[in-house]
Image (cartoon, rainbow, N blue to C red):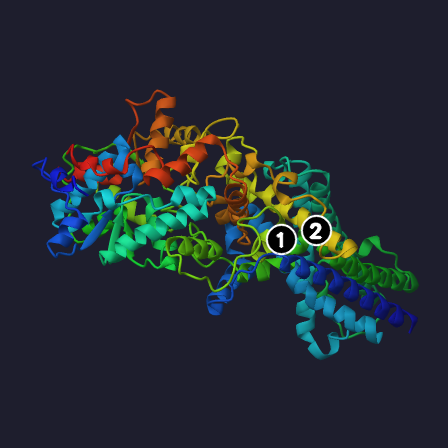
Amino acid sequence: MNNESDNTTTHQTLQVPTMSEMAAKGEQPEILFWVGCAGSFDERAQRITRAICKILQHVGIKYAVLGTEESCTGDPAKRAGNEFLFQMQALTNIEILNAYDIKKIVTGCPHCFNIIKNEYPDLGGSYDVIHHSQLIQQLIDEGKLVSADGEGFKGKKITFHDPCYLGRGNKIYEAPRKALEALDADLIEMKRCKANGLCCGAGGAQLFKEPEPGTKDINVERIEEVISHQASVVASACPFCMIMLRDGVKHFNKETEIEVLDIAEITLKANNL
Amino acid sequence: MIQQILFLLFLIVAVILFTKNVRKITRNIRIGRPEDRSDNPSKRWLVMTKVAFGQTKMAARPIPAVLHFFVYAGFIIINIEVLEIVIDGLLGTHRIFSQPLGGFYIFLIASFEWLAASVLIACIVFLIRRNILKVKRFFGTEMTEWPRSDANYILYFEIILMSAFLLMNAADYKMLRLFSDSSLSLSAFPVSQLLGSVLPSDQASLHIIERSFWWLHIVGIFIFLNYLPYSKHFHIIMAFPNTYYSNLRPKAWLNNMPSVTNEVKAMIDPSYTPETAHTGSFGARDVKDLSWKSLMDAYTCTECGRCTSECPANITGKLLSPRKIMMDTRDRLTEVGLNIDKHGNDYTDGKSLLDDYISREEIWACTTCQACIKACPVNIDPLAIILDLRRYAIMEESKASPSINNMLSNIENNAAPWKYSPADRFNWAKNI
């Protein structure tokens, strides 16, 4: 916690307030931004994290992050079968969240979203949890985000890859599409979309291990589908999907033709932020 | 009179045998661990009505959905006819409902005939799909000799039953037309009258034919009823309770193990004493360690393969097949049940679901994407079994690949699945 005050003063454009600072001032955020491990450490996902912060700051929502007080939700441990480790993580996190009297949480990751929303309540952690796509949808609906479309998605074929833990797992299909519909782009659906969306291959702790022997990797199968629909942008809303989809694009040497972006980044660009 | 006694005997034997087998299956399901699925009955009735009765999840594949609907509607509605046959059989009457129901009876029999014809056609198309077109979904490593034969036997059975029903009616129709002044209108037999020409025209032969197919039809049903508990076709019964006890939470929800909560709370706070002490293993090695709902799922599976055809691991050539998970669970449970019958409750045969039936390679190929759960027309959850097996491998055996172990020790030591220092967790805010 010692270095947090330094962190927040080393930049001019963006102030990322931490919960401990806020609590010290006796203040309470409207919403806590749960960054997640990928959003904190993975370089590509860090850009999504910053995009979400910029959006929050732009619309003037009073938010905070836990900073170094955040730790893994326990999702990969639970899905790998280590219920002990998961519950240790969960109870530690719940203790911190409850100590700060957190009511509302936005996550940058569908796995964090699912586990805090669906699995923490039984362990004593009940919060109003939304995923960042739902926040963006809400802000678009309220007119707080508009599509200035500065970076020009105009005429581009964009497709959305449904993250399993957001889509099929929690039936959130429209929120992320809202951010894309706001663009002047050609939104196309892949054959396997929404409830039938094909997994990127990362869930259930797969991201952290080599796949079992097979005929191909799951992300390759998915990018083949993207290619067959001639999409030039694949949007997603999950840092794990981001890693897998980018690897899939690399597999086909299509980095210059297919861009993989999070809906937060797309929203940011569209709003000229 | 002899016919009536014989019929009563058949009926009693069929019902007793069936009850005995259903009891065994119920007992086998109860071998599983307790899990509370009694909440929210109104929502459960609704799910059952929609998914089992209304077959809403079948609609995802329209061709089999339509064909299956014919067979399903035929099964449900023709049961009214079976009721009449049973009463006739016991009382020695002939078409006992025809008098009291009058014109409605004619409508009923006519619609049964159309249904029977649809069932017949659907079953023939199903046979073609399985044996000539060889639809990919019906094959795969787990679709060995028995499951493939089982599927065909069911279809043959239904074809025989429907043919017997129509031929019985055809003989009746011809007798009515040629020799009777019965009030039963000939329009009750829109399909079977087309078969009249293949039958002889003398009354004695027609009577024998009518009786023979009547007996074939009802005895066939008794046999089929008792084939169900051994067959994947048991889904016609299990679909109802299984959808009633569906998971009502979001698909991505995974249960928190209360036994673990107790242990973890005791670790954090040594003064904490759990209400109930933990017994048995963490996770599942064998069927007895699975939730009873997973065992019910196994008896409900009709091996249609929708789960496997949508499983990303299976699509990309991995060993994992959700259908195999369900079939293995049922096979093992049947084996455990037979062991109990033969040797009593405490017998162990040294085998287990994990390793003897389902391999480590299979359980570790799962991405927990829930596509299998979504695909299943009767809300079976193969993921619950996979997760319980993983839990055993991790919590009881500490047996996993080095990369999984790395990930777990990272979370344990530095609160992230990767090897980064917790102190660096907020560094992303530095480079804005």
Give the left or right position of residue B411, taking residue B69 as reference: left
Name the residue furthest bottom: B100
Chain of the residue where label 2 is placed in the rendered structure? B
Q: Identify the residue at image location x=35%, y=36%.
A: A241
- Across and down, in percent, residue A204 comes to 44, 41
Q: Which mark is residue B32?
A: none
Q: Which of B281 and B109 is in front in this view?
A: B281
- Across and down, in percent, residue B207 comes to 88, 64
Whether tag 2 and tag 1 are in contact, CB under 8 A, the answer is: yes
Report which residue position mark 1 lands on.
B288
Chain of the residue where label 1 is placed in the rendered structure? B
Report which residue position mark 2 lands on.
B336
Does residue A131 lie above or below B313 as drawn?
below
Does residue B104 lie above or below B301 as drawn?
below
Does residue B298 lie above or below A238 as drawn?
below
Picture quadrant of residue A259: top left
Name the residue furthest top: A253
Q: What residue type is labelled 2?
A: Val
- Across and down, in percent, residue B421 comes to 28, 35
Give the left or right position of residue B241, taking residue B251 as reference: right
Q: Quadrant where the N terminus of chain A lies?
A: top left
